[in-house]
Amino acid sequence: MSRPPISSSAGSDTPITEIQDDRYGFDILAKGLVRSIMTLSPGISTVIGIEGKWGAGKTSLLNLLLSYMRDKSPPGMHILQISPWLNPAGSALTQHLLIPVAAILDEQESCTLSPMRRRWQRLRRAPASPIAKDLINYAQQASGHLAPVAELAGNFVPGLGIVAKSLKTVSRLELSRHKETAAAMRARIEERIAKSGASFIVVIDDLDRLEPSQAVEVLRLVRSVADFTGFRYVMCYDQGVLAHAVEQELGVENGRQYLQKIIPLAFSLPLPEAFNLRREFLHGALQLYARVNHDEPDAGEIADLRKAANIYGQALSTPREVSLVLNALEFRYAEIRDYVYFPDLCLLHIIRVTNSALYDWIEQYLTVYAVVASGEGNLSDVEQQKMADDLRTKLKRYISKDASSPSELGNWVPGISDFDDNLSLFVKPADWNQEKMLEHKRLGSRMFWRYYFALAAPQNVLPPALLNELLSRFANPADRASLAVEMVGYIKEINLSHVTWYDHIFSQLTRRKIATLSFTQCEGLLWYLFHYSDMAGVRFAEAGRDVRTTLQLEVVCDVMRHILTLSRPRALYLIRKLFMQGRSKEWLVSLMRDLLWGHGIKGTRSFDSEDQFLTLQELSGLQESMAVRMSAEEMKNSICSGQLKLATALEFFQYRFSDSFGGNPQLYSCGLSAL
């Protein structure tokens, strides 16, 4: 069954435009800034700088600022917004600013005419007002364009502003005839603007996106060319980036000092409050998980997700970095959700955004680790020491003690040990830890780690059609024997990945995939596992490896859990029958032990409560079936001959028959003496 596509917003980094979307306190900042800007004397010209790192939210703040300024602006105040980096290449910014100003002043002047006069002006398409014409002439001279302004959107018509598709506004002949200096025109414009009572707030965003020459042109505009009375400029930029552009273009030694001369009023965007960025990341990550899985993460996943956010998320410094992490997760997670542990994936992409060198180191390390841990290759002491030194260098990027600790990283990435400040790599984890990594598809699992970096399994990917074909054949009892032989034949490695097709088939049998199976398909899978798992174990042993029992345990439990939901009485009868007749003696004894552990009867390895799929009465019934099976002659002979692992068998016996041993103390003595 194909999975319907999940709608994704990956790639979105749109600044907010509405107050209700504000999650970082920009609304309060915008209100305060508007009050400060509006109280400035209308008779002065000044420049206000809003400084912040790329991605800090300057444009979001500016959008709210514009909204409030338009609401609060008094009559005669006009708000203009310019995005210089959107202007066509080679166009003059002076014209893009002054022509809209000319249109506004022309409209304002036309309003002083009587209605009849205005209608007459429109009919005869009278030329622009004197102040509008002066501004256009001035724009041409200030921008260095003495040639006609080519189709600057048309002539002015009083009361209509700029009319599209009309003649060129000012000809070369006019400029030659007047031969007026820019200074003289500027003085006349100043006088007329002051007389009109108009004032302007010009907002210029993304100044740090410009080429150095363009950025310097903007600075020249606001402080020399268009610093008319009543003009206030609000500019957003990253101070470091803009200062570097000034140094590069003008050859000045200190770009920051130069900016201080140009921008007398500067406001630095405050850093987000300590937990805001991590809070927003957690909020977005949990929303993504629920949307993709139609479910909430369990308590363990939430705890690990919070740990990753609290330790490595401290390095998140801007809202954009939060968006980058969430976008990366959104783009990848739905496709690989069945093969990764969500908190590990989140951790990895927090690191990728905040410390990309460490991310690259982790991928390289895991690539080598997969070969070293399998015994197929090795690294010299010199090579290992170099990797260890590289790791320490990359961890120094973090300020917090936990995030910079190799030991903490070792909780997520396998084989890293830092005992007494002695950093070691490729340390073999304990068996129980390897099983846990495999069971939960962790980043530290040799079978699943590659999914975290690519949308695929290590080396090669099992075609989905092949898995679907196998599952359909499991539903046919007549085909099961030949299919079992074929399944065991899949125990062959995929290139040098040390992962077999057999491993890969079981990795595809996720809980969600199993939930789509019919009763007969589940019956066929259980039949195979109970009859052929020991044979698979022998094949793995011949290849010098242990069968992946942890993965098979997860699959068999998920199959039993699902088949019980389809028909509980019928499924219980089938499972008891398989315990009585299954030919994989060692495997089924281990399975019985694991079911006792998982349901909390013995040991400390119980499943989560929601995963305990058998009632105590049902489990007791299976124990009785197993008791009958263990007392059969074939099982006694298997134990005493060593064919059945005594440790596993006796462990089960002691759990179930510690007193009378099922009425057969001789067998218990036989087992103990054999030990």
Image (cartoon, rainbow, N blue to C red):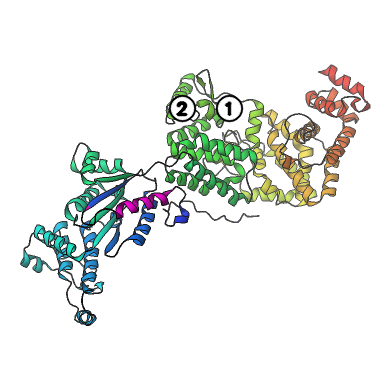
Q: Secondary structure at mark 2?
A: helix
Q: Nearer the viewer, residue 479 or 146?
A: 146
First to last magenta residue range: 24-45
Position of residue 270 relative to residue 61, above or below, is above
Q: Is residue 39 magenta?
A: yes
Q: Nearer the viewer, residue 415 or 277?
A: 277
Residue 670 percent coordinates (x, y): 87, 20
Q: Is residue 86 magenta?
A: no
Q: Nearer the viewer, mark 2 or mark 1?
A: 2
Give me the residue at 70% from left, 50% from top. Answer: 515
Give me the residue at 63% from left, 55% from top. Answer: 2
Amino acid at the residue labelled 1: Ala
What is the number of the mark on residue 373? 1
Say whether disc 2 or disc 1 marks the residue closer to the N-terminus: 1
Q: Is residue 516 left or right of residue 112?
A: right
Q: Nearer the viewer, residue 127 or 432?
A: 127
Which residue is identified by label 2? 391
Structural crowding at the residue carrying mark 1, measured as other residues with C-alpha within 10 Å and reported as few (<14), some (14–19) or many (≥20): some
Amino acid at the residue labelled 2: Leu
Give me the C-alpha separation between circle 2 and circle 1. 19 Å
Give me the residue at 62% from left, 54% from top. Answer: 3
User: Which corner quadrant of the image does residue 76 belong to?
Assistant: bottom left
What is the number of the mark on residue 612? none
Q: Is residue 646 left or right of residue 549?
A: right
Q: Nearer the viewer, residue 54 or 199?
A: 199
Residue 271 percent coordinates (x, y): 40, 41
Residue 396 percent coordinates (x, y): 43, 28
Q: Is residue 320 left or right of residue 217?
A: right
User: Which corner quadrant of the image does residue 135 belong to?
Assistant: bottom left
